[in-house]
């Protein structure tokens, strides 16, 4: 099995708070708009749009918001035309590789702010290609680990999932990028409730980050993830549960 990072689970918990204050909806809408602009507004005929819309539905984004985002992408609005996807790469405290996907209407501004975020939180922004080789695009499905165990998710394996593993209070199902939709459908058909399902850049291997760097690394990832132009943040670290519990207690 390829390495996976604690960041996926931590980010999933964080997403609930982001949704409450509307920040997550803004980012989801932008991703939908760009997907519709680049591949058309047909959810069934545009796989990228389909995944973006499903992610918005998983976050309980209202249908009207989703449709408005699609309409902006398929219309003639200058705001949609000006948005471009730019990826930034760097390293965080403890040597963790960090990959940041942004959707921006001003790459110079965003690039400057990404550099500031890294440098002021114990990291360093790298050159294009410096860490991207450490990741690969995969499908990741999360379900509630208190309700389901690995044995409950055998339909995912039958549908082509590559791995199922428990990660704290969630269970992760890992798929090839092309199999995400089919595996999700198989789980739902078997009555399994999905917490999230998305294409992500999974690390091929991970680095263990100790107590001295863990807090600084998580602060960096929080700063990046909270940035208005950031769509996704990926990292390849592992942090011991005891350290995470200690950090949560201090928060």
Image: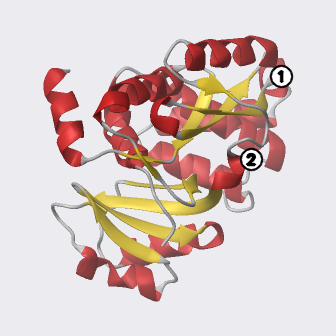
In the image, what residue occupies the spot 55% across and 19% down? Answer: 227
**Quarter of the figure with the C terminus:** top left
Q: How is the image coloured?
A: secondary structure
For disc 1, the marked residue is 82
Q: Nearer the viewer, residue 10 or 242?
A: 242
5 on left or right of 202: left
Q: Nearer the viewer, residue 107 or 20?
A: 107
Tell me the SS state at disc 1: helix
In the image, what residue occupies the spot 28% across and 34% down? Answer: 211
Kindly check if marks 2 and 1 are in contact, taking CB atoms under 8 A apart as contact.
Answer: no
The crowding category of the residue bearing disc 1, from other C-alpha atoms within 10 Å (few below 14, some 14 to 19, many at least 20), is few
Quadrant housing residue 77? top right
**x%, y% of residue 98?**
58, 38
For disc 2, the marked residue is 41
The crowding category of the residue bearing disc 2, from other C-alpha atoms within 10 Å (few below 14, some 14 to 19, many at least 20), is many
Q: Relative to residue 15, is residue 136 depicted above or below?
A: below
41 on left or right of 235: right
Tell me the SS state at disc 2: loop
250 on left or right of 219: left
Question: Tag 1 or tag 2, which sits nearer the N-term?
Answer: 2
In the image, what residue occupies the spot 79% across and 19% down? Answer: 107
**x%, y% of residue 172?**
37, 63
**x%, y% of residue 62?**
45, 36
Q: Relative to residue 112, is residue 243 depicted above or below?
A: below
**x%, y% of residue 13?**
31, 39
Q: Nearer the viewer, residue 1 or 37?
A: 1
Quadrant housing residue 242? top left
In three-dimensional space, the C-alpha distance between marks 2 and 1, rounded to whole angstroms, equals: 18 Å
Q: Nearer the viewer, mark 2 or mark 1?
A: 1
Quadrant housing residue 32? top right
In the image, what residue occupies the spot 54% across and 62% down? Answer: 139
Residue furthest toward the bottom?
Answer: 158
């Amino acid at each position: 099995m390829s390495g996976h990072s604690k960041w996926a689970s931590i980010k999933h918990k964080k997403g609930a708070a982001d949704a409450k204050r509307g920040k997550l909806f803004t980012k989801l809408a932008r991703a939908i708009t760009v997907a519709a602009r680049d591949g058309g507004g047909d959810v069934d005929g545009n796989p990228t749009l389909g995944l973006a819309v499903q992610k918005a539905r998983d976050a309980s984004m209202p249908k009207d918001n989703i449709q408005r985002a699609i309409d902006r992408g398929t219309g003639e609005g200058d705001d949609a035309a000006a948005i471009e996807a730019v990826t930034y790469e760097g390293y965080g405290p403890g040597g963790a590789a960090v990959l940041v996907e942004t959707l921006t209407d001003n790459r110079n501004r965003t690039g400057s702010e990404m550099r500031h975020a890294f440098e002021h939180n114990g990291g360093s922004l790298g050159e294009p290609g410096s860490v991207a080789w450490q990741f690969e695009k995969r499908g990741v499905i999360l379900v509630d680990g208190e309700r389901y165990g690995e044995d409950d998710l055998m339909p995912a394996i039958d549908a082509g999932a590559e791995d199922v593993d428990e990660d704290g209070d969630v269970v992760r199902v890992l798929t090839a990028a092309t199999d995400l939709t089919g595996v999700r459908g198989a789980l739902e058909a078997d009555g399994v409730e999905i917490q999230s399902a998305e294409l992500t850049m999974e690390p091929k291997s991970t680095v263990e980050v100790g107590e001295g760097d863990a807090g600084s690394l998580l602060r960096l990832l929080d700063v990046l993830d909270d940035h208005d132009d950031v769509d996704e943040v990926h990292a390849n670290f592992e942090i011991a549960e005891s350290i995470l519990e200690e950090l949560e207690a201090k928060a």
